[in-house]
Image (cartoon, coloured by chain):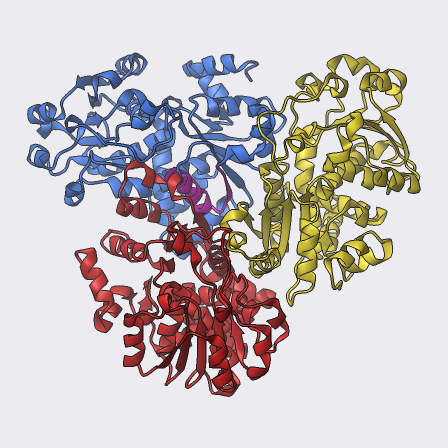
Chain colours: A blue, B red, C yellow
Amino acid sequence: MANSFESFKAGMDSREERRTLLQRDGKPFFVLISQQFMRADIESLCDTATAIRRLDRHVEGRDFLRSMLRGHRIMNLFAQPSTRTAESFIAAADKLGASTRQVSDLRTSSFAKGESVEDAVRTLSSFFDAIVTRHQDDDFAARAAWALSRSGRPIPVISAGSGKSQHVSQSLLDIYTLRYSFAERGGVDGKDVVIIGDVARNRAARSLAYLLARFERPRIHFVSPDAFAPDDALLRYLDRHEVRTTINSSLATLLKDQGGGIDAIYVTRLQQEWDRGNNGIPDATDRGSADEFVLKPEYRSLLRPDCLLMHPLPRVNELPEEWEDHPGFMVWRQVRNGMWIRAALFAAVFGCDGEIRNRAARLRLL
Amino acid sequence: MANSFESFKAGMDSREERRTLLQRDGKPFFVLISQQFMRADIESLCDTATAIRRLDRHVEGRDFLRSMLRGHRIMNLFAQPSTRTAESFIAAADKLGASTRQVSDLRTSSFAKGESVEDAVRTLSSFFDAIVTRHQDDDFAARAAWALSRSGRPIPVISAGSGKSQHVSQSLLDIYTLRYSFAERGGVDGKDVVIIGDVARNRAARSLAYLLARFERPRIHFVSPDAFAPDDALLRYLDRHEVRTTINSSLATLLKDQGGGIDAIYVTRLQQEWDRGNNGIPDATDRGSADEFVLKPEYRSLLRPDCLLMHPLPRVNELPEEWEDHPGFMVWRQVRNGMWIRAALFAAVFGCDGEIRNRAARLRLL
Amino acid sequence: MANSFESFKAGMDSREERRTLLQRDGKPFFVLISQQFMRADIESLCDTATAIRRLDRHVEGRDFLRSMLRGHRIMNLFAQPSTRTAESFIAAADKLGASTRQVSDLRTSSFAKGESVEDAVRTLSSFFDAIVTRHQDDDFAARAAWALSRSGRPIPVISAGSGKSQHVSQSLLDIYTLRYSFAERGGVDGKDVVIIGDVARNRAARSLAYLLARFERPRIHFVSPDAFAPDDALLRYLDRHEVRTTINSSLATLLKDQGGGIDAIYVTRLQQEWDRGNNGIPDATDRGSADEFVLKPEYRSLLRPDCLLMHPLPRVNELPEEWEDHPGFMVWRQVRNGMWIRAALFAAVFGCDGEIRNRAARLRLL
């Protein structure tokens, strides 16, 4: 239990302290950053997600799943508007039978009455068994976790996107999609992944890179505007974990040179809303990506047919509709996988993941 | 499966193609227009609604109903604000045990990020088993249906009000109310129905007229401002289906001449919000109806005591409170019936309507 | 059944008529004012709350509780923003298995279409089995109750805060917290309670004072700005019920003189939002309380260690964080108790409170 938020935050940077701060009884309690997941954690989450996905296909499996978190209450505390991520978490909780509530407009909550964030979070948390939170402030989720860890009734906090820094549940679904798709090809180890976008402020891209570091010698090819290249902290982390990286400013050149060796391309939208200084809330003035960061249909012949094409959505112009019939087009699977991996995350947090995997194994679904 | 939205829409105008486009396995899959329901469909929906209404009265029946759609997830995607219709659909889904979510503010969804409507609907649909949608655009629901019909995971789409054109679930509840009330009087066939309001842009009134055409030789007396008289397409359709119609500009004259022959009066609010060009969103500036379109208390002696008085609500001044003690005042029953008929619609879409009617019949409730 | 709202309201002031108007079959039906609860009602509600709280600790108890209101639908109709109270009621309903819906923005409902409040409430009520309502208008909840009592399908109405006048569920949770904490000290009878704040317009403080009058000879020390001292109606009521009161303008003086005799201090936030004439909606311009109404850390030595410290939240500066480690600091328990007492209130309204207390007694939890 950290006495100041600063020491809590510093602890999160240390591999040893991190486990103490973020886990309880060997289970994730606060889910804040991709780095907190070890390789075994990731494998286990992915197996749980597959178990849930397959159990959900039949009425008995659905009833079993819905008994897992019956009577548990989960709050989505979303300061930053995001219908899709919010609904994904709510669907995930619902699949396991938990009750959910969305609290979106913090202006209507007590924050407006001169109350401290700590008081507000603690008050709302009194009615729930876990909080999922999204906020434009990089530190909000961590601060909520810290405040609750010092209270008489701490409950789990799961980040659903923290400012520009991390989007841990998105990266888990992306890894799940990669792992599943590469199942017949030796898994994620040693794969070549292209990440396109303004990585410095795209939390989905950054979180994915952190998670890839848990696998054996992957290679990441970043393609980003110079001003938004991967930050040094990320690059040092990848280097320390033996991830080979290249930094590229032209997608066309990269694909012409090495297209046949690429196993997956992760395309992201340019995060232009941050340029407008409006707290990360997108609006309709997005112009989309410049030519160099668009995966053009004419690159098709440069790629292998089994190359995966992924995007965290929403997309503007950077992954044109023409790609939808490519055999590696995974975008709609990613969306569904988001629901399954988030359900797996709830199962892990509440400690019913083992029971779910066992049930699926007994029914030969795993 | 239509390749372009235009061919999908054209198909909806053809009686033959319509069934292929809007049904799956003999069940309604996309519920978009009143014309898609045949007489037998309507009778069956009404019986299901009655079965649900009666089963809901006792705890065993309620538990049975709540098991019907347990584990199913339904989204209300409402671009146009409407608490009452939204809550009616949600209550209906809840009665059958489905989980529901309301997505009202499309600005907080990905639409704002430069994303296509098709992408947004498809993404959100990934977390659900059916979509109920309301939109100021006449074509939104049909476009969503078309986009999903081309996707790898199509789910049912039910329109809860499309622009000025149709309000199919409202017309089903109105027909249910008429059929139920006329049960001892030979049913809806051959009845004289007055429809008051600006029919040209009142989707509830238009949808009701389309449904009445499924019955034997009814007569419809329209009373509307000249500028908003029934449109030619509607009148041609009614004529083709042997519905006798009269067009009237004065309610007083109509009732003085033929009041004793009228079986039901359907009063509607003038849709003045469309005059203000604000996308069909009403506000507090409504002045209510002009004298000619108000059902004045002094007309009471011109009507039979068994004449039904109906209104889709909300009302301003056009159906004064003095009518509430008239034996034919059906307005509050319409509201409850809306919940029952929408539950019947969900049951039909998900194919559990037969089981519900059988259960009710076995318990002698039908 | 009152014919006019005025006679309904007048009846609420009369001890005899009140029961007829607000109860059905010996159960509370409309929950509007603290005065409607007799001593026995309060004891029974508190016992039910304790039973629910203890049953909720184990999975069998939780499942039993969730079967109590399964299939019942409860609407939170909140015109005044309040996430915490809304979520507390929703959590309470959820604990008993009821379905809940939040309707917050009355602008998106039919109110905007020129419709009467009576029509709107009656329409929405058609989809529900009870309404919980909060409104800046002192009379809204009572008016909704009156309108429904005259309808063909009346349902219970529970006020969740009415303008400046009453906040009955808050006072029930406060009394529950007092009663529970004083269990080993002879209960609430004869206790000395300090109430700090602008009592004249603080509905929580006023409702608590009304409830304290149900106990034997308590003493209330009010500390408030001159302009917002307790109103005459409240003081006369307390006098008639043999509650001894003192009016104080300085907390420091009161505590120096009589601190050792104080059993509980109820601190409230100054309700500055009413000064700005914006319908009781707080905003971020709150400056907090002036020095005389702050419970300063240096008063600690003036109080007994078993003196209770309470606050309805949100707080600004009037109950500083330094008090959190005081043994009598009850604020976070109040928040949880709010959920339990509201569940008890639903149980009483729907008549399943006896069954809940019996179950708990059989399991030796009461």
| Residue C329 in which image quadrant | top right
Return the residue nearer the eye: C179 or C271.
C271
x and y percent of residue C22 in the render? Answer: 76, 56
Is residue B308 found left or right of C316 in the rendered image? Answer: left
x and y percent of residue A248 in the render? Answer: 16, 19
x and y percent of residue C75 in the render? Answer: 58, 52
Return the residue nearer the eye: A160 or A57.
A160
Whether A191 is drawn above or below A335: the answer is above
Q: Quadrant of the N terminus of chain C?
A: bottom right
Report the residue at 46% width, 12% height from top.
A10
Is residue B182 found left or right of C309 in the rendered image? Answer: left
Q: Magenta segment: does it hold A58?
A: no
| Residue C119 in which image quadrant | bottom right
State the count of labels: 0
Q: Quadrant of the C terminus of chain C?
A: top right
Report the residue at 64% width, 73% height from top.
B325
x and y percent of residue A145 in the render? Answer: 51, 24
Report the span colored magenta: A83-104
Whether C325 is drawn above or below C181: the answer is above
Instruction: Kindly tell me whether residue A327 is visible in this rendering.
Output: no
